[in-house]
Image (cartoon, rainbow, N blue to C red):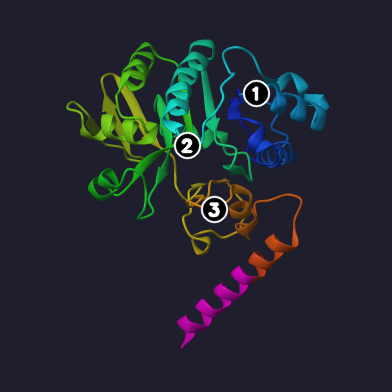
Amino acid sequence: KMETHNPLPIFAFGNMRFARVAENWLIHILKLRINEFKVFCHDDDLQRFLAHRFPEHSEKFVFNSETAFEIDPTNLSLYFKFRKVLFRKLLLNHTEYIFSDLDAIWLSDVRNTFREPGADMVLQKVVHNFACPLDIRWKTGYTGCLGLWYMKKTPELLDFLIQFIEDKEPHDQVSFNRILFKKEGAKQLPDKKGHVRILFRGVTFGFADPSIIQRPYYRRHFNSWDRQGVVHPVVKEGTRTIDTLMKFNLWRPISLRSCFFQILEASYRTQRKVRKLK
């Protein structure tokens, strides 16, 4: 476990539809003895479910008028807009925090990794070939993921978030990356440690080490035997989140299905070693 000074709180959002995914996320978080977290619930069903499942942490499952939202899976742009506003509200009330999707699974306490680039906002760096938005991926070689990031409160970042909220692009990740990489005025900052940092309108943006904060697209891109960092697998269209987490051996309790995929992974790695020896 990585020791953290002034431990960063981790915030997550969800509704009852993702109750089991939230439970799995919390099992991993609590296994690491991370106690600085909150789940902001979009309905009272999830709040009650989590409070019943984890009664000793019931005060960390928040449902109120500011978090309530009925998600329409056929029109997610409304939820993206709501989420942007909630991100800013949380920053107004906190000095700094990490936001984590419920399918971003914490295998070790690497919260300080988000502080290392020395930036006001640090995003998960997505490098696979299908990273969203594709035009930014092909231009820069990576994009920033809005499912896992860190923010530190500054007046300039709060102003940037207003611009982000008001942007007409309905998809929040597309909107964010295009503002950052396509608007005039963004400047790349040199960094001796190898971190990517961008200065835009007084805000420094950074990107977390993708070998620690992972965003694998294919199962073969992830080594489940080295259980370190945060793993945030891509849930492909038409695939259930639970099935993806099982496939990546990120589901607890361990199931026969997750064991099968771990055996398959071991077989794949053995075959690859054999091919290299030939």
Q: Which mark is residue 16?
A: none
At label 1, which amino acid type do we have? Answer: Asp
Mark 2: secondary structure = loop
At label 2, which amino acid type do we have? Answer: Thr
At label 3, which amino acid type do we have? Answer: Thr
- State how far apart marks 1 and 3 are (Cα): 24 Å
Residue 143 shows in this picture: yes
Mark 1: secondary structure = loop
- State how far apart marks 3 and 2 are (Cα): 16 Å
Which residue is pictured at 26% across the width and 25% down the height?
Answer: 200
Which residue corresponds to mark 2? 74
Mark in front: 2 vs 1: 2
Residue 265 is one of the magenta-drawn residues? yes
Magenta segment main secondary structure: helix
Q: Which mark is residue 239?
A: 3
* Residue 277 percent location from the top left of the image: 48, 85
* Residue 270 percent location from the top left of the image: 57, 77
Do the numbered discs 2 and 1 sit on residues whose CB atoms are within 8 Å? no
Q: Quadrant of the N terminus?
A: top right
Instruction: State left or right for residue 144 relative to residue 242.
Output: left
Mark in front: 3 vs 2: 2
| Residue 228 vertical placement versus 34 (above, below) | below
Range of residues picked out in magenta: 264-278
Which residue corresponds to mark 1? 43
Mark 2 or mark 3, which is nearer the start of the sequence? 2
Which residue is pictured at 47% across the width and 83% down the height?
Answer: 275
| Residue 36 vertical placement versus 272 (above, below) | above
Mark 1 or mark 2, which is nearer the start of the sequence? 1
